[in-house]
Amino acid sequence: MLDFNESNTTEQMLLTTLQRNGWEYIPAEELDRDESDVMVESMVRSALIRLNPEIAQDESRADEVIYRLRTLFLSANAQNLVTQNEAFKELVFEKNSYPFGENGRQVSIDLFGTEVNGKLDQNQYVVTNQWVYPKKKGGKRLDLVLLVNGFPFAIGELKTPVRAAITWLDGAQDINKYEQSIPQMFVSNVFNFATEGRCYRYGSVCMPASKYGPWHTTEDKSDGSLAAVQTSVQDMITPYKMMDLFQFFTLYATDSKYRKYKVIARYQQYEGANMIVDRVRAGYPKKGLIWHFQGSGKSYLMEFAAVKLRMLPDLMNPTVLIVDDRLDLESQITAQFHSSDVGNLESASTREQLMTMLRQDIRKIIITTIFRFQEVTGELSLRDNIIVMVDECHRTQEGDLGIKMRAALPNAFFFGLTGTPINRIDKNTFATFGATEDRSGYMSKYSFSDSIRDHATLPLNFEPVPVDLRVDKDTMDREFDVLTEGLSDAERGELSRRVNMKAIMYNEARIHKVCAHIAKHFTEKIRPNGYKAQVVVYDRPCCIKYKAELDKLLGEKCSTIVMDTNDDKADEYKPYRRTKDEEAKILDRFRDPHDPLEIVIVTAKLLTGFDAPILQVMYLDKPMKDHTLLQAICRTNRTYDEGKTNGLIVDYIGIFDNVAKALDFDEGSMKKVITNIEEVKKQIPALLRKCLSYFMGVDRTVEGWEGLMAAQECLPTNKEKDKFAADYQVLNRAWNAISPDPILTAIQADYVWLSKVYESIKPTNGGGGLIWAALGPKTMEIVNSNLDVGQVHDEEEILSLDAELIDSFIEKYKNAKTASKKVEIDLVARIHQHSDDPKFVRLGDKLERLREQHEQGLINSIEFLKMLLELAKEAAQAEKEVVPEEEIDKGKAALTELFNGVKNINTPVIVERVVTDIDDIVKIVRFDGWQNTTAGRQEVKKALRSVVWVKYKIKDKEVFDKAYSYIEQYY
């Protein structure tokens, strides 16, 4: 019987791919090692001799190096594994001196060829499978081991791609167990990886399996197939990237409880940091803009880039300047760099320190804030190997501060990093940091949907509250207009700012109701799951008012206020006046799941840069917009545990009545979708048929990984894979939501068959060990309890940015969608008919952007139809302005015939070029009815003269006259 199994699919595909990548395959039983050997010592010895002339002179010296390494491996245990892993890296790059020089002089010994020593091509790269350790009966069997110069650098666990209950997560969990039982195998480890042939995930030593991440490329971010796994492996596990990750992209940090952990770069950090390095090495362009979404690790990106820039010898010992726009971010970045033991690090905490460091040519990593450039005048350094990385660059770089910084460092490189997409009105950030070589304006982009797909961050859900708690802005604005009639715009604006909103936000009755809702919502929906909350209020007096109300409802220990207490002349906020250390301790208490402090009340603090994964819900009762709003709500979307599947915003202001408008950014990754299970239920038969149709004609008789990959080729493009993944996930969720409804009985056999096929190409957060990480039972309970089927505007409907949820208006807008399709088809036909005309090229671009907005959920079907009709109107108008295609053809044909007739050996060019040039220039100058006006005739003759007489030197008057008469007739 033909079969797909782990050995003939996943394992064989990876071995084949790795060999193509430059890894030499040697079966484990052929490797020369003793029972307890972790290293293949014969390979280690050969590398030492090959890389070091001092050892080549006396090969016995290799034994001393090997002895020191063997001691490190044998002393490893599960409790000190990260420390031993760090110690191995130190032995390689720092504590690598041996008395092998002349007269016992200490010399550095290379265990590996690196980019720094220029010997990368002298390493031996080996992949082996079914490695047993210890090498005896009962030893642990590892699926794949990758060796560099005899040291195990990566371990891979593989699973079958066709069993529903098995995923990559099972493989990653196996690795976690091996780290406990055979820690010696992980002392020299760079990273581990796991795959079941659908998803590829990797992580560092002692990283929980649930924290493993994907490796994608800029061109291909797909998941769910052998081809996708192969793409990830082809890109990541190359000899060069293995050594690059080992030397520059792994860090060792210490948490607040003094525990060591290892950090390895995610693919977007690796890509962004290396783009910075590549531009500095090339010397051009000297700037670039990086947008990596909130929570996706920009700080580590800067750290990886800084470390590599400082270590590359060809950059001549550069200065790396990390610039933040706030003191708290400066402290946060400095603490992160210090916790990672990054060397040659300085903090320029005053303007004088900064100026002194730059004038004295300090060659280190310097962390400072943009405001230290406030009083800087003139040049501080003319060096061209100063690299400036500006964090949250959209906020402070367009004014005097950015200008002063560039004037002080005129030859420096400037790279801007932002966690929010650049707003349409924020064009200066592109001008300041965006290089013209980057077509999108961004050097590197990692969007909201990218971070959700990779589980780097969580989806954001928005929950409106009962109407009586909402701020009725329309009524408020109308009443305000009546009250302020006769005042100037400036007076109205000032009064509105001071009185209008403030009066509402200070209303005692409303505050009481809002706090009662917060207390009920928190105790029923957030606290039972072990998560915490943030309450964002209008201003500092409101902080005090809300705290007093919440104390009555939840007790004093449950909440605290974190706010700026400067300018507190009346000592109103004295109880919350804290030093930096005291505030840090409060926030550590908030992060502690066992501490009774569960809610922080804020107005301006902790809305940016605050990282507390245990925070799930933000109760938002303060007007905000754009970057500030996006940064604030993203405090809730950090990953925490498997039960936390989303960040939640409870909106008392009504900001998210229109998500697309509230977050009015260029990127289409913000989505507004309303879930409605009943509407999905109605679609099950159609969705089932649609899913089945993807796999028509699949040949399932071919065995092995080639056969399975061929089966997956019925989804040849990422777009089709995405469509299938979305369709199947909707079907799967709907099925589970309504099962065992009697309507499912008739189609159950088809559903079961489809599910089996789906298992081999399942999207990232599919079944097996991952299904509860994607949507746990508690979350389902929350969603279902807040869903009133049939009422679109229910007071507790959930608005979601989760890209996987289905548009509930499928049924409601069926007619609109049909109409949209008809208009769209007609529009595409018109655009195609005039595909060479610039007007229609622009219309095609507009249509494509409109489609993207619709697909991304930024506009619903009705809005889509309206916009399509506007485009159709534009197309109709444009058609009036162009000559019908058949007439253009007639004109060209007539002119071609004319010039063929007069062509001789003295005619300097081919006929086709003459005719094309005349056709192009006449179309520009002529207009409707030009033949009937003197001005029109003169313009056309002038244009014709410029082609026939001037450009092509054809001075024959008869030719000119005939050409003009043809133009007059046919154009």
Image: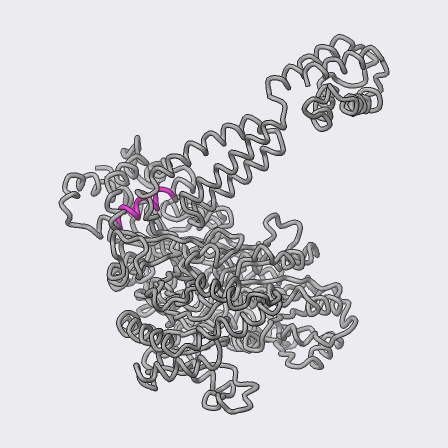
Tell me where residue 465 sits by quadrant.
bottom left
Decide if residue 54 is in sight here.
no
User: Residue visible at 74% across and 22% down?
Assistant: 918
Magenta stretch holds residue 489: no
In-image side of 750 versus 910 (left or right): left
Q: Position of residue 380 (x, y in %)?
A: 76, 72
Instruction: Residue 724: say if magenta.
Output: yes
As rendered, which of 495 and 218 lies closer to the eye?
Answer: 495
Taking the spot 82% from the left edge, 10% from the top edge, the residue there is 958
**Residue at x 80% of width, y 13% of height:** 961
Give the colour scheme of this rendering: one colour
The picture places residue 541, in percent across and down from the top left corner, at: 47, 82
3 displayed left or right of 327: left
Which part of the image, by quadrant, shows the C terminus?
Answer: top right
Looking at the image, can residue 159 be seen?
yes
| Left or right side of 345 for 21 | left
Q: Main secondary structure of the magenta part?
A: helix
Q: Which residues are magenta?
A: 723-733
Quadrant position of the N terminus in the picture: top left
Q: Which residue is nearer to you in this view: 578 or 214? A: 578
The answer to whether residue 818 is above or below residue 39 is above
Q: How many marks?
A: 0
Determine the residue located farthest toward the top in the rendered image.
Answer: 901
Residue 915 in the image, given as x and y percentages of width and height: 72, 19
Residue 707 rendering spot, x and y as whole percentages: 33, 37
Image: 548 above or below 525: below
In the image, taking residue 358 as reference, residue 46 lies left or right, namely left
